Image (spheres, rainbow, N blue to C red):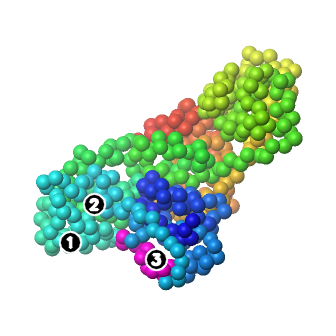
């Protein structure tokens, strides 16, 4: 692998990095980034990777010479309004091999996201980026506080005050907003609406078309920023559902699933399956890891032939169905109490019950089953930990803009989230955010740790959680 990669990460939207950029981040021994890099991108790094702000070319050269692979992240493209060329020359002079991974630039990405075509057949055939002139479409990148300078420069260059113009605020991020008005009125309208920050100033025929072509602004969660704390391997469908509704999704997993290596205890549990009357799966993770244990000892789903199989929650049931097992009973709630109630008509006296679960699971289920006369064996098949980079990413997130909503899919995600902050002191922006939980047990945990669980999914799945968030925040 090339020792150093200069990586364009696009305009800031985590979904707009290229596959090659994602690969560079996930493979690197060290990741260096500019200020303002989205926390959701930094958690793509390996758990053992060295992640820190870029301090200078010398540290990159030394790391490469020590045999480490380095990904240096640049907003947009490393060679477009960035100092990637400076680092590239330093690497070349030091005889360090490197490659450049291009990225989307904000001027073209943000305008497309807001439905502003920069070229229109017969109306706009020339474009100027970052420069005044006689082109049909002009795009200027403006830092916060310089909006008036940009508008004045366009007018002084001969652009009519009645010409359609737009500010695209927070350009290239999921939180970007579009404001359209005549060039001479644009500043006044922006001030009335309380808009500020970095922006693109755009003029040209395509601005008028944005009223019809800006499909993102019509989505129910447009402009809302939502944090996903679920384990990364389980978060993709949830992220996609929220993004499809227009939300800006920040992924910082507060939980990582680590299978527990096979032991004499797990091998004995599998050996005794013919004598086990009931197997209760409490999560989709427990299903995946338990079946891997079966395969590792040359068994498969047929080993459960003598057992009745139950699932807590519909997602667990779907995981079982993926293994060819249709659970005999599915508890509608992600709670041990819900399963115990669903088992109300079953005679469990003297029945051996196996419960594959997390190492630190709730004790309510075995206690409730034991009350019914069952012989309960708990089999820890995985443990949950907080990814090392997540705590710092969370602190950075809530030291900045924060989010509109925080989502929790299990009690572990809540506990690890709160533990990310020194002495469990939650920043003000955490307390201002809506807290959305996938079930009453998770909501109870959130409340006990000082969070207000004001959104609880009626259906205890990520889809149910997405619908509850949409209903509350749209």
- The residue positioned 49% from the left and 39% from the top of the image is 466
Q: Identify the image quadrant of the N terminus.
A: bottom right
**N-term mark: 2 or 1:** 1
Q: Residue 387's x, y, as percent?
A: 65, 56
Q: Residues within 10 Å of mark 1 (few under 14, many from 20)?
A: some
Do tag 2 and tag 3 residues touch (Cβ < 8 Å)?
no
Depth order, front residue of 317/195: 317
Q: Which residue range is magenta in the image?
A: 80-92
Magenta part, dominant SS: helix
Which residue corresponds to mark 1?
Answer: 132
Query: Which mark, residue 42?
Result: none
C-alpha span from label 2 to label 3: 33 Å
Query: Which mark, residue 167?
Result: 2
Q: Is residue 174 visible?
A: yes
Where disc 3 sits, the SS reads helix
In the image, taking residue 312 as reference, residue 127 lies left or right, namely left
* Up/down of 194 relative to 279, above or below: below
Q: Residue 326's x, y, as percent?
A: 65, 23
- The residue positioned 68% from the left and 28% from the top of the image is 311
Where disc 1 sits, the SS reads loop
Depth order, front residue of 107/164: 107
C-alpha span from label 2 to label 1: 16 Å
């Amino acid at each position: 692998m090339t020792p150093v990669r200069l990586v364009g990460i696009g305009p800031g939207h985590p979904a707009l990095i290229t596959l090659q950029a994602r690969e560079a981040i996930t493979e690197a021994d060290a990741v260096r980034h500019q200020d303002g890099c989205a926390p959701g991108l930094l958690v793509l790094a390996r758990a053992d990777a060295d992640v820190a702000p870029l301090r200078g070319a010398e540290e990159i050269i030394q790391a490469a010479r020590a045999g480490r692979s380095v990904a240096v992240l640049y907003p947009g493209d490393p060679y477009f309004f960035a100092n990637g060329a400076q680092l590239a020359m330093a690497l070349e002079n030091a005889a360090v091999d490197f490659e450049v991974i291009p990225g989307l630039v904000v001027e073209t990405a943000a305008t497309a996201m807001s439905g502003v075509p920069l070229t229109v057949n017969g109306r706009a055939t020339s474009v100027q980026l970052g420069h005044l002139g006689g082109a049909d479409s002009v795009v200027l990148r403006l830092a916060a506080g310089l909006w008036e300078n940009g508008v004045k420069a366009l007018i002084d260059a001969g652009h009519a005050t009645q010409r359609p113009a737009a500010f695209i605020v927070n350009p290239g991020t999921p939180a970007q907003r579009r404001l359209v008005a005549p060039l001479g009125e644009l500043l006044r309208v922006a001030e009335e609406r309380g808009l500020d920050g970095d922006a693109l100033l755009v003029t040209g025929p395509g601005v008028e078309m944005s009223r019809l072509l800006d499909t993102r602004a019509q989505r129910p969660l447009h402009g809302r920023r939502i944090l996903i704390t679920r384990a990364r391997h389980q978060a993709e469908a949830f992220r996609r559902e929220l993004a499809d509704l227009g939300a800006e999704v920040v992924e910082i997993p507060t939980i990582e699933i680590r299978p527990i290596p096979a032991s004499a205890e797990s091998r004995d549990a599998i050996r005794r399956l013919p004598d086990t009357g009931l197997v209760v799966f409490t999560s989709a993770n427990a299903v995946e890891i338990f079946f891997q244990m079966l395969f590792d000892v040359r068994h498969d789903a047929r080993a459960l032939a003598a057992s009745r199989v139950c699932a807590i929650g519909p997602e667990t049931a779907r995981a079982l169905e993926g293994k060819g097992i249709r659970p005999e009973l599915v508890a509608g709630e992600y709670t041990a109490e819900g399963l115990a109630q669903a088992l109300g008509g079953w005679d469990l006296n003297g029945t051996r019950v196996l419960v594959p679960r997390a190492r630190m699971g709730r004790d309510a289920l075995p206690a409730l089953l034991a009350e019914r006369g069952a012989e309960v064996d708990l089999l820890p098949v995985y443990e949950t930990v907080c990814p090392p980079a997540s705590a710092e990413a969370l602190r950075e997130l809530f030291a900045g803009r924060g989010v509109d909503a925080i989502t929790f899919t299990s009690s572990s995600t809540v506990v690890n989230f709160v533990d990310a902050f020194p002495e469990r002191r939650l920043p003000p922006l955490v307390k201002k955010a809506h807290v959305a939980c996938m079930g009453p047990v998770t909501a109870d945990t959130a409340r006990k740790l000082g969070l207000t669980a004001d959104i609880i999914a009626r259906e205890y799945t990520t889809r149910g959680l997405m619908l509850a968030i949409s209903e509350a925040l749209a």
